[in-house]
């Protein structure tokens, strides 16, 4: 199977897309799916008053256009491991995107989670007609489910019980969140210094409802199908289903909400979507840069799973400022309540805003 998959390297094909025509409603639904109600993403009248002239999408929005899925290796589980996206301009309402992908590399690794695994890298271009809008590179670990379960790398982790006082503190942080958003204020590069910290955000404690909101915003994608469409998919891909204790094959993504199935692949319980956590870090950055700047590049590496019940704190700081290029870079990280680093990344922000004009959808 491995050599057959390697033979596909470089072969381009068009992705099955969740959304092609990008509307303001689709962008808003995605943003709200990760708890981001920035009016630049959610309110067309406000967005029209900004330098962009219309609603633009958060930097990880391409997840709801088309997500490159791991190919081949039937029955071998896939764990999303990270991304790198480079934009020519922001994705905005009115775009009609076409997504072309290809397997770029397949590398064998040895690790504690499942022993032998494979890092699968795909490169996807997203174009609006003849205009290249973005190039996205995604990484996935392909792992052996039975081996991961037997090794039990994460089984010692337990779910935290929160006190009423802790929940009250979390609630207050959420209520104060918008106060730190820059909004229409100017990101003045002359006032930004290396080492400046971004206002932190929290996400969680992660719940199955958070996962549902994410799926509502991003779209079900390739594996989550209903009724006849699911069984037609199983007929084409017999090893795709995760069979529960009652003999029913479910979507492999049920590991994100079904504790018993999650334990079959060596996890202590359901966990978040990797793209979801990437979107959280994007939220951290866009809240800070305001509505007169945009993310030209974002890179994120996922380091450990984030489980239902986990509370995540997102932090970041400025690592470089280039006034001549009208740009800066920030590093960001996600740390759970145990102190585990679960994700880290970097974003390049540009303050030279392209005026995109009025949308015609």
Image (cartoon, rainbow, N blue to C red):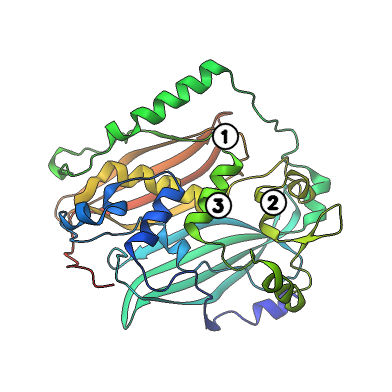
- Given residues 214 and 226, the one toward you in this image is 226
Relative placement, left or right, of 252 versus 316 is right
Foreground label between 3 and 1: 3
Which of the two labelled residues, at mark 3 and mark 1, occupies the earlier sequence position?
3
- Given residues 178 and 134, the one toward you in this image is 178
Read off the residue under disc 1.
340
- Given residues 91 and 301, the one toward you in this image is 91
Foreground label between 2 and 1: 2
Q: Position of residue 31 (x, y in %)?
A: 39, 51
Read off the residue under disc 2.
255
Label 2, label 1: how many angstroms apart (C-alpha)? 21 Å
Residue at x 77%, y 58% (from the top left corner): 144
Q: Which mark is residue 267?
A: none
Label 3, label 1: how many angstroms apart (C-alpha)? 16 Å
| Residue 225, image quadrant | bottom right
Relative placement, left or right, of 92 versus 314 is left
Read off the residue under disc 3.
274
- Which quadrant of the rendered structure holds the C terminus? bottom left
Q: Position of residue 357 (x, y in %)?
A: 17, 68
Q: Residue furthest right?
A: 246
Callout 3: helix, strand or loop? helix
Q: Position of residue 240 (x, y in %)?
A: 74, 67
- Given residues 93 and 271, the one toward you in this image is 93
Contact check, label 3 and label 1, Cβ < 8 Å: no
Callout 1: helix, strand or loop? loop
Contact check, label 2 and label 3, Cβ < 8 Å: no
Q: Residues within 10 Å of mark 2 (few under 14, many from 20)?
A: many
Which of the two labelled residues, at mark 2 and mark 3, occupies the earlier sequence position?
2
Residue at x 40%, y 30% (from the top left corner): 174
């Amino acid at each position: 199977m491995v050599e057959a998959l390697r033979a596909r390297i470089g072969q381009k094909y068009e992705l099955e897309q969740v959304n092609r025509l990008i509307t303001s409603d689709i962008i808003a639904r995605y943003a709200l799916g990760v708890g981001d109600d920035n009016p630049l993403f959610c309110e067309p009248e406000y967005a029209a008053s900004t330098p962009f002239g219309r609603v633009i999408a958060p930097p990880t929005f391409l997840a709801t256009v088309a997500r490159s899925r791991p190919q081949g290796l039937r029955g071998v589980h896939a764990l999303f491991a990270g991304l790198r996206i480079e934009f020519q301009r922001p994705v905005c309402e009115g775009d009609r995107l076409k997504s072309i992908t290809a397997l770029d590399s397949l590398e064998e690794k040895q690790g504690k989670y499942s022993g032998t695994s494979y890092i699968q890298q795909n490169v996807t271009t997203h174009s609006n007609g003849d205009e290249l809008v973005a190039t996205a590179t995604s990484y996935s670990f392909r792992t052996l489910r039975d081996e991961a379960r037997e090794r039990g790398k994460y089984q010692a982790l337990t779910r935290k019980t929160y006190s009423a006082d802790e929940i009250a503190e979390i609630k207050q942080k959420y209520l104060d969140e918008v106060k730190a958003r820059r909004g229409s204020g100017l990101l003045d590069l002359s006032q930004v210094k290396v080492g400046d910290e971004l206002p932190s955000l929290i996400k969680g404690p992660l719940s199955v409802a958070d996962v549902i909101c994410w799926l509502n915003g991003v779209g079900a994608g390739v594996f989550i199908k209903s009724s006849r469409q699911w069984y037609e998919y199983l007929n084409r891909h017999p090893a795709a289903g995760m069979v529960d204790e009652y003999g029913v094959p479910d979507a492999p993504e049920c590991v994100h909400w079904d504790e018993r199935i999650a334990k079959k692949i060596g996890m202590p319980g359901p966990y978040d979507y990797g793209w979801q956590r990437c979107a959280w870090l994007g939220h951290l950055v866009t809240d800070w840069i305001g509505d007169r700047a945009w993310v030209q590049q974002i890179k994120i590496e996922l380091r450990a799973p984030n489980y239902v019940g986990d509370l995540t704190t997102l932090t970041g700081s400025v690592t470089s400022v280039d006034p001549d290029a009208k740009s800066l870079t920030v590093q960001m990280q996600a740390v759970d309540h145990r102190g585990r680093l679960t994700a880290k990344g970097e974003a390049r922000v540009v303050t030279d805003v392209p005026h995109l004009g009025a949308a015609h959808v």
